[in-house]
Image (cartoon, grey):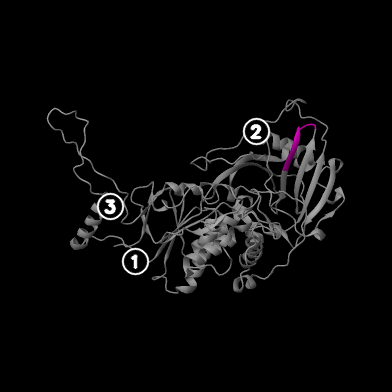
Amino acid sequence: MSDSRETIVIIGAGVVGVSTAYFTMKKLISQYPDAATRPRVILFEQCEPGCSASGKSGGFLARHWSDGTDTEQLAQFSYDLHAKLAAEHDGAARWGFRPLDTFSAEIDRISVAPAKQRKKTHQRTESESVVTSIEVIAPQTSRSSATAMEEYSSHPPTPRTQEDGMQTSTHASISVPDVQAVKTVAPETVPWLKTDVVTNLRQVGGTTNTAQVDPLKLTRELLAEAKARGLEVIRGKVIDVAETGYRPPVIELSIDRRGNQAPDLLTVETCKTTSQTMMELDEASSHTGITSTKKPYVVLLDQDGLDIPADKIVVACGAWATSCLRWEAFREVSASQIPIQGLRVHYLVIKPKTEIAAQAVFAEINGTVYSGEDAIEIYPRPDGSVFVCGEALDDPEMPPHNPFEPVYSKRATSRLKQIVNDVSPALSFDAIQYGLACHLPVHAKGIPVISKVPTSKGLYIAAGHGCWGILNGPATGMAVSELLVNGKCSSLNLDNFRLDRWY
């Protein structure tokens, strides 16, 4: 006998999917004290929780670096939500949450060329070009905004929209809004950098407005909390989402050979659609006692016997979100509405011999060695490791079908190793443990999609958060949980993130 309870399916166990599952379970427990009547929530993941960008990113959090953009309210709300989650679940111990100071460093003319690495005449190819995942651009005058989460819940502010209706690019809209918060400091302020190559050092954030987490630990700990509240997790790849009772029209033709006519001549003998046939079968089954699901969707997996009837479905699979375009139930969604691809970014995990202070550094490097400008991000973590990322490709690309498939470039990884070795004595070659890459899910308009599919009964998409996925993941999850459980979002205004905003 099929389960008569409402079934909610979430596809993707990155930070957005896990946050959605966590907040949905909390809301359902509050509204349905009796577990027997409580809706089921099932999370699908084809690999491991946090196996791509949610487990392989820096985990940097900034409260005001999106001010003046379409994601201002989302970022501020989610920053405060991170602090609340950490206080509730001991995030400092469980996923390395801590406030930290943040600096922008200009490093110029590193004079010693690495052996057998570069020639003076070397020209950078497209695959070697770099896009920093966070750009600190000209400060802007700060705008007043509510700081308490309760104020957001009761009075969601009207979203601020760019004059041209879109962000200027995936990353260039990020800024430090408060002129007073940016100050030039002595190179010795960050003693683990080579001070003789630092030409300019600015503090662009402090412990009141920038923080960090270990994103993989955050994702998996929130998943553990959701499972403790009744979340079901199934490892499997979704290959289709079918709409119950719907079949695409197919005209059946038969060959009618008349006399000596060529056998390839066709006449239409029947013109009955498959959908009509299925409707007749469904009607017949109701008289024969065959049980048929009343749920509007069926999630089809790559494993026999695990197809799941569902009432509501959330696509939260990051750079793989466009997979839903191949699914039957999402036939009304166009590629132009979710132009999400993966921006390949390389990273290193380093274990220095000496402890490094809680100082995040965004370094822009110019010099004769690198024939241009490189930008890297350095995040010391509470466990003693240091996460460094950079060497992104210029253009987004479609990620491989298998998130476990290696995507890193040996040349880009070697280049990143050389850069960090040259800018910090603590981050020398012998301290580097490994280097890999991941795909950040970037939207062509520079902002995520957090929306119900307008023409659907219960289909939702939450993806395309770019380099701010870890920051905005919890708020996105809370917003989607409100759509799922309450039918509307009361904590945030989601107009900027509508699926049909652009097309």
| Residue 47 appearing in the image | no
The residue furthest left is 259
Residue 273: percent from left, percent from top: 26, 49
Asked if the residue under mark 3 is in contact with the one under mark 1, i.e. CB atoms within 8 Å, the reply is no
Residue that mark 1 sits on? 4
Quadrant that contains the N terminus: bottom left
Residue type at the position of mark 1: Ser
Left/right of residue 98 with respect to residue 216 in the rendered view = right
Q: Is residue 370 magenta?
A: yes
How far apart in space, not on screen, are marks 2 and 1 (Cα)? 55 Å
Residue that mark 2 sits on? 126
Asked if the residue under mark 2 is in contact with the one under mark 3, i.e. CB atoms within 8 Å, the reply is no
Question: Which of the two discs, 1 and 3, labels the residue nearer the N terminus?
Answer: 1
How far apart in space, not on screen, are marks 3 and 2 (Cα)? 49 Å
Residue 330 versus residue 411 in the image, above or below: below
**What is the magenta range?**
368-375
How far apart in space, not on screen, are marks 1 and 3 (Cα)? 25 Å
Residue type at the position of mark 3: Ser
Residue type at the position of mark 2: Glu
Q: Is residue 219 magenta?
A: no
**Element assignment for label 3:** helix
Q: Which mark is residue 275?
A: 3
Q: Nearer the viewer, residue 242 or 99?
A: 242
**Element assignment for label 1:** loop
Residue 196: percent from left, percent from top: 87, 41
Residue 431 versus residue 328 in the image, above or below: above
Foreground tag (1 vs 3) = 3
Q: Nearer the viewer, residue 387 or 186?
A: 186
Residue 16: percent from left, percent from top: 55, 56
